[in-house]
Image (spheres, rainbow, N blue to C red):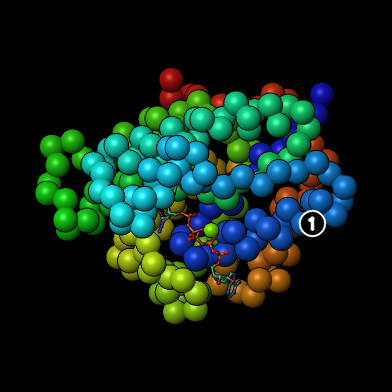
């Protein structure tokens, strides 16, 4: 039995994730396949509204608390993800659990405002709440240097984490995650090129999955349980 493919687009801020997610959606729809675009954080839910207020610096929160809210925001949509995939719908997801780890694990080392904590957000601590979420079949990591993103992309620097030092650290944590996931499930795309060049590379990787995937929806990092 085939099911829909779970495709995640990750990357640094302003690397073009939402642009490419929208183009991919159009392509899959044009092929007359059932497809749905999701985005995390999903700012439309009550949890998402707390996250939105935090990201716009309208409220402050303990680092652990906001990390767990980002994860809860995925869990509240996880059964919908699973049932869509099982019903044969392809899912394109703009950011997922990998952003959760990359941003939280980085900020503990960067934020000057936080006093040294007796319970720092380690990589393992950050990963734990997302263990067992539906696992992507493919993650496309849009890679761009933070300097290029800041120079060339509109809107950079408007939200809390969009600072060069933070973004450089985030990029390192993403590299670690990619290495651990392995080449089969994690593909790095050079996002510093034109929209069309990036789109072409993405389609090359995604098109074989659009016909469907065999086997059950996997659980993320279940080997850690
Ligand atoms: N976060 C977290 O901490 N923990 C979590 O668990 C999750 C997220 C899920 C908000 O995310 C923050 O939440 C984020 C991580 C943290 N950190 N920050 N800040 P968000 O996804 O809501 O952020 P966003 O507002 O959508 O921005 P973005 O995702 O960083 O942007 P993007 O989607 O990668 O880029 P874009 O909107 O497609 O493009 C940006 C601009 O560049 C736009 O003007 C485009 O027209 C232009 N663009 C796009 N592609 C190109 C190319 N190829 N060439 C030239 N110009 C281009
Ligand atoms: Mg975006």
Which quarter of the figure is the N terminus placed in?
top right
185 or 51, nearer to the observer: 51
* Residue 150 showing in the rendered view: yes
38 or 108, nearer to the observer: 38
Which quarter of the figure is the C terminus placed in?
top left
Residue shown at the point (71%, 32%) measured from the top left? 85
- The x, y position of residue 157, in whole percent, is 38, 69
Q: Residues within 10 Å of mark 1 (few under 14, many from 20)?
A: some
- The x, y position of residue 79, in whole percent, is 60, 26
Q: Is 49 situated left or right of 27 in this image?
A: left
Q: Is 128 situated left or right of 194 in this image?
A: left
Residue shown at the point (72%, 56%) measured from the top left? 24
Tally of numbered discs: 1
Q: Is 72 situated left or right of 16 in this image?
A: left
Residue tagged by mark 1?
Answer: 27
Residue most extreme to the right: 32
Q: Is residue 127 above or below residue 160?
A: above
Residue shown at the point (12%, 49%) measured from the top left? 115
Residue shown at the point (52%, 44%) measured from the top left? 44
* Residue 102 showing in the rendered view: no
Q: Is disc 1 placed on a helix, strand or loop?
A: helix
């Amino acid at each position: 039995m085939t099911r829909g493919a779970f495709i995640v687009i990750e990357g640094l801020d302003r690397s073009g994730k939402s642009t490419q997610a929208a183009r991919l959606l159009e392509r899959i729809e044009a092929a007359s396949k059932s497809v749905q675009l999701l985005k995390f954080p999903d700012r439309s839910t009550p949890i998402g509204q707390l996250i939105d207020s935090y990201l716009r610096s309208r409220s402050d929160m303990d680092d652990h608390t906001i990390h767990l809210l980002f994860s809860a925001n995925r869990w509240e949509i996880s059964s919908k993800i699973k049932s869509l995939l099982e019903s044969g719908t392809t899912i394109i997801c703009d950011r997922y659990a990998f952003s959760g780890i990359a941003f939280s694990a980085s900020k503990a080392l960067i934020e000057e405002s936080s006093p040294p904590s007796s319970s720092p957000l380690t990589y393992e601590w950050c990963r734990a709440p997302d263990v067992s979420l539906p696992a992507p079949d493919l993650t496309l990591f849009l890679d761009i240097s933070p300097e290029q993103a800041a120079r060339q992309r509109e809107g950079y620097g408007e939200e809390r984490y969009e600072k060069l030092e933070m973004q450089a650290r985030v990029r390192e944590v993403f590299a670690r995650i990619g290495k651990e996931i392995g080449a089969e499930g994690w593909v790095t795309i050079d996002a510093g090129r034109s929209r069309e060049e990036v789109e072409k590379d993405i389609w090359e990787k995604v098109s074989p999955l659009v016909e469907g995937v065999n086997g059950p929806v996997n659980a993320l990092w279940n080997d850690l349980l």
